[in-house]
Image (cartoon, rainbow, N blue to C red):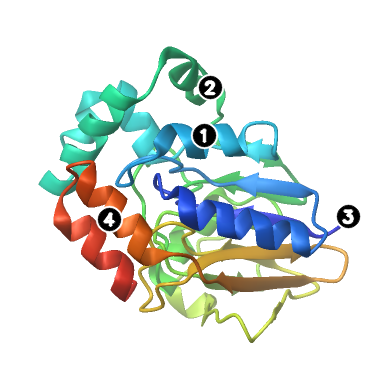
Amino acid sequence: MARIAVLSDIHGNVHALEAVLADVSREGIGDVICLGDVIGYGPHPERCLELLSGRCRIAVRGNHEDALFDSTISEGFNPVARFAIEWTRRRLRQEHLDAIRMMRSVHDQSPYLICVHDSPVPPSTTGYVGDPATAALAFRGVDARVCLVGHTHVPMAFATDSDDCGDRLHGTDVEATILHDDEPYELKRSGRHILNPGSVGQPRDGDPRASYATIDLKDNLFEVRRVEYNIGLAQREMRRAGLPDLLAHRLAVGA
């Protein structure tokens, strides 16, 4: 299997997405996976959806996509996120909504790969896999060597020696690694992994650069890449759109 680009949490930030896709092209990668939350927060949800259309071999829905159609999800958002999703709903045309409806919530290619936005354990729609304890629970839904997730906006890897999703793991059974762009992560030859590429459009790990990853299941490598983009322009366009200033501010600090 050739190297694949893994993107997540673009959140309507077209400038970050364009920079990432340009980097993907420079790397000679033709295969792209998107782990959801293409929309929400940012001022260009439709352009992000259009850029990814036809580019992604796999595209799963995130909780922000689900919130467009299910008000019980958006009602659980904080006020800033709820404002942004309501703004986004007014912005999108019918063809964009139809494209989102076509996305799966889970893409399962067991025993090799599972792709999901948040948690692989149903019926969770907002589960954050962000530490060994939550990863131990999430591994109960991972019947594959690798599960790709987003949602936390932080690039991380979780690994266990367990090969069986029936094993009732604890946090002590899981190895957690914070991922950086200068430190390729080597997959174990056995066991299972949960891998997070971080966020293209709204990183929350203190690094404001767009984050995505590449995975090569043949060479057993997962590599985070960070890409500079015009944050100032993205901020100005968010403010001109009337989106909450907090959303623009956090782009500059990666939080």
- Give yes or no for contact between labels 2 and 1 (Cβ–Cβ under 8 Å): yes
Q: Looking at the image, is mark 3 or mark 1 nearer the viewer?
A: 1
Decide which of tag 4 and tag 2 comes sooner along the chain. 2
What's the distance in space between the residues labelled 4 and 3, CA to CA? Answer: 41 Å
Q: Is residue 142 above or below residue 67?
A: below
Residue 49 marker: 1
Horizontal side of residue 54 vs 27, given as left or right: left
State the image quarter where residue 122 is shown.
top left
Q: In the rendering, at what x and y percent does residue 143 appear?
A: 66, 49
User: In this orientation, which residue lies closer to the viewer: 51 or 161?
Assistant: 51
Give the label, 4 or 3, closer to the camera.
Answer: 4
| x and y percentages locating residue 231 in the rendered image | 38, 65
Q: Where is mark 2, residue-wise?
A: 99
Give the CA distance from mark 3 to mark 2. Answer: 27 Å
The type of residue carrying mark 2 is: Ala
Whichever of labels 3 and 1 marks the residue nearer the N terminus, that label is: 3
The residue carrying pointer 2 sits among few (fewer than 14), some (14 to 19) or many (20 or more) residues within 10 Å by Cα, namely few
